[in-house]
Image (cartoon, helix red, strand yellow):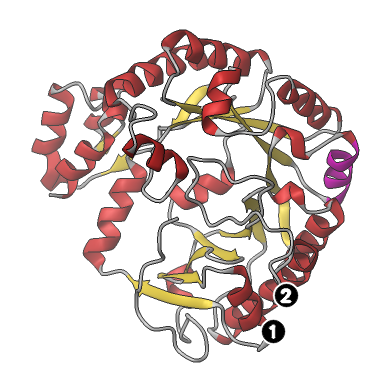
Amino acid sequence: MPELPAGLAVPDGGPLEPGRGAESAGRTFSVYLHVPFCRVRCGYCDFNTYTAAELGGGASQSDFAATAVAGVALAAAELARAGLPSRAVETVFFGGGTPTLLQPSDLARMLDAVRQEWGLAPGAEVTTEANPDSVDAASLAALAAAGFTRISIGMQSAVPHVLATLERTHTPENVPRAVAAARAVGLEVSVDLIYGTPGEDVADWRRSVDAAIALEPDHISAYALGIEEGTRMGARVRRGEIAPTDPDDQAEKYLIADEAFAAAGHRWYEISNWARAGHECRHNLAYWRNEDWWGIGPGAHSHVGGVRFWNVKHPRAYAARLAAGLSPAAGREILSPGEREFERVMLGVRLAEGVAVDGGRAGVVADLVAAGLADPGAAVGGVVVLTRRGRLLADAVTRALTD
């Protein structure tokens, strides 16, 4: 898994100095809770996850809820000490790892801590990720009763041999059962897909796309597989056991998915995300719009008051710092105006709403329109909205707008 950046040293009092409140004016506030446990670590995964049920040092699955609650309390104290405005939480997202490996009562306890420290805004979105085989009717009912509103199910593929290459533990039949159980208790449902797995042909991908649409979810995410150094899949590619990913193959599969999702009533709102109207993931939109969020858990990142910071990576180190009353932040960065502008464009250009650019870039925008990468209608108003082809070349568009 990748190492955390070094960044700037964190002051003794925590990552935020007093006086950062002005930077947060007008921004919404969200909370991310990273649950770092998985039953089996998938061969392609480079996330900060661990398979041991008992890591020791206060970092076991059974201890984790208490550790996260302490993390929430410390975060609230640091925000108050820095003089940032008190804001109700608009969105909460439990990610990982597989959060639903914890008992529903543990997840409810963590959500209650957020509710007690900051309060939840009316209509707050509360999501947990889940594997199809990590939930059942009873656990989903308990989550809904605790205040969860949404579940994101890691479907990945509907084809057994693709799931086997990804080293996923569920079978395709698990997915519709999980979706039906979630819908029965009133949860919004998102399903996640991965395309470009070695050995997945176009027919396999169409089968997965059709299966996802048949579930009638509220939201669909589809991500191109990246094979990272340090993963088991990366080692298999180096040994020649499986082929590397093919960018042209992934581009073709993206276009197949986008066309099918649109025909089924799912509008793209971010390059890798589609939703029925009104069912966009508000938590992820907070990231792409550079709102404020605080990350709880080992390795979790935050963006508050114009400061980015990240927690120590290992669950034992994270638990130890909280037990000692110390900030778990390992490093931070304060972006320059130029860096902030680059991030605004890089993130905003991924969205269907587009990104506004100043008049000094009119020539660049005209070139993007001429190349078929930007929508000509939006460009008239100084907003860059990517065409379908432009979405395949979003990084090139970002470079052109920020060069």
Q: What's the distance in space between the residues labelled 1 and 2, CA to CA?
A: 9 Å
Q: Is residue 162 left or right of residue 391?
A: right
- Residue with the most extreme right position: 138
Q: Is residue 275 visible?
A: no
Q: Earlier in the sequence, mark 1 or mark 2?
A: 2
Mark 1: which secondary structure?
helix
Which image quadrant is residue 193 in? Answer: top right
Q: Residues within 10 Å of mark 2 (few under 14, many from 20)?
A: some
Q: Position of residue 133 (x, y in %)?
A: 75, 34
From the image, tell me which residue sits under label 1.
323
Label ID, residue 58? 2
Residue at the (77%, 65%) spot, across then down: 65
Q: Position of residue 295 (x, y in %)?
A: 57, 64
Residue at the (29%, 27%) spot, across then down: 392
**Mostly what secondary structure, the magenta segment?**
helix
Q: Position of residue 245 (x, y in %)?
A: 34, 29
Mark 2: which secondary structure?
loop
Q: Position of residue 92 (x, y in %)?
A: 66, 54
Q: Is residue 257 left or right of residue 297?
A: left
Q: Is residue 70 left or right of residue 32?
A: right
Amino acid type indicated by mark 1: Ala
CB under 8 Å between callouts 1 and 2? yes
In the rendered image of this protein, does residue 193 appear above or below residue 127? above
Q: Residues within 10 Å of mark 1 (few under 14, many from 20)?
A: some
Residues shaded magenta: 138-146
In the rendered image of this protein, does residue 360 appear above or below residue 192? below
Q: Is residue 241 magenta?
A: no
